[in-house]
Image (tube, rainbow, N blue to C red):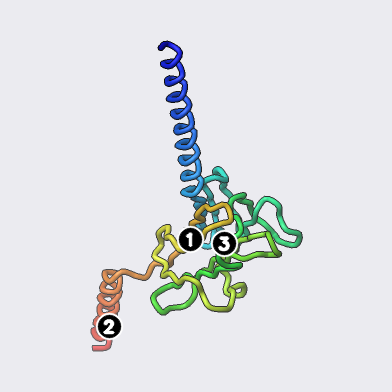
């Protein structure tokens, strides 16, 4: 009787261990699939440069350049690509070899910035943030966003590790004068006109 009870207990233990192992494996796989690499490009005010931050499986990365273009690469920098920073989990896209995002100054307005994700050479994915009209990439855009001065989500793609790479951009928006400023300017001009008339009279 004791022997039978011991065998039943051993079978239950084995089944529980196998079940727990399967659950742990499933949880690990789910966490890997839901892992997200977040890349932010921020244009600093008054053409002060571009800051790039990344968080996710690559760990925190923070780099700033003084120009209007930022080159981001995987750690194994392809020869000839001028990387300003590296992020290991950019990965290779599972669906396309390149993506182009246009960021407009206003709806239907001129191009302000671009994000270009592409393979520099096979197996090397790179990402460029462009804010100089001379460097803009021609061709159809995979996404178009109107800038609003906040950190905006502009694009997602799935890399070869099954991770989502999310790209955000904060453009340096030149603020238009407010209506109150126009009213003040109009009032000042009317005042000058009235003063000139009095002097002539």
Instruction: Please report the residue visible at 23 percent of the width from the left and 84 percent of the height from the top.
Output: 198
Task: Point out which mark residue 94 bears.
Answer: 3
Task: State which tag comes first along the sequence, 2 or 3.
Answer: 3
Q: Nearer the viewer, residue 58 or 17?
A: 17
- Give the quadrant of the N terminus: top left
Disc 2 residue crowd, few under 14, some 14–19, many 20+, Cα 10 Å: few
Q: Nearer the viewer, residue 117 or 44?
A: 117
- Give the quadrant of the C terminus: bottom left
Task: State which tag comes first along the sequence, 3 or 1.
Answer: 3
Of badges 2 and 1, the one in the foreground is: 1
Outermost residue on the bottom side: it is: 201
Q: Nearer the viewer, residue 32 or 19?
A: 19
Mark 2 highlights which residue?
A: 193
Instruction: Please report the residue visible at 52 percent of the width from the left and 52 percent of the height from the top.
Output: 163
Q: In the shown orientation, is residue 164 left or right of residue 134?
A: left
Task: Report the Cα–Cα distance between label 2 and label 1.
Answer: 56 Å
Mark 1 highlights which residue?
A: 156
């Amino acid at each position: 009787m004791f022997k039978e009870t011991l065998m039943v207990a051993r079978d239950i233990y084995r089944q529980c261990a196998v079940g727990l192992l399967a659950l742990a494996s499933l949880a690990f796989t789910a966490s890997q699939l839901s892992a997200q690499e977040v890349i932010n490009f921020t244009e600093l005010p008054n053409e002060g440069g571009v800051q790039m931050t990344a968080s996710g499986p690559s760990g925190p990365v923070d780099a700033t350049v003084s120009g209007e273009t930022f080159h981001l690469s995987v750690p194994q920098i392809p020869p000839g690509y001028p990387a300003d920073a590296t992020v290991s989990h950019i990965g290779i896209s599972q669906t396309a070899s390149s993506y182009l995002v246009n960021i407009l100054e206003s709806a239907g307005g001129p191009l302000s910035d671009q994000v270009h994700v592409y393979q520099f050479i096979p197996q090397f994915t790179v990402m460029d943030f462009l804010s100089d009209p001379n460097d803009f990439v021609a061709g159809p855009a995979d996404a178009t966003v109107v800038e609003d001065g906040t950190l905006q989500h502009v694009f997602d793609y799935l890399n070869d590790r099954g991770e989502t790479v999310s790209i955000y951009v904060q453009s340096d928006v030149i603020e238009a004068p407010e209506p109150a400023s126009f009213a003040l300017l109009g009032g000042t001009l009317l005042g000058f006109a009235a003063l000139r008339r009095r002097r002539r009279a």
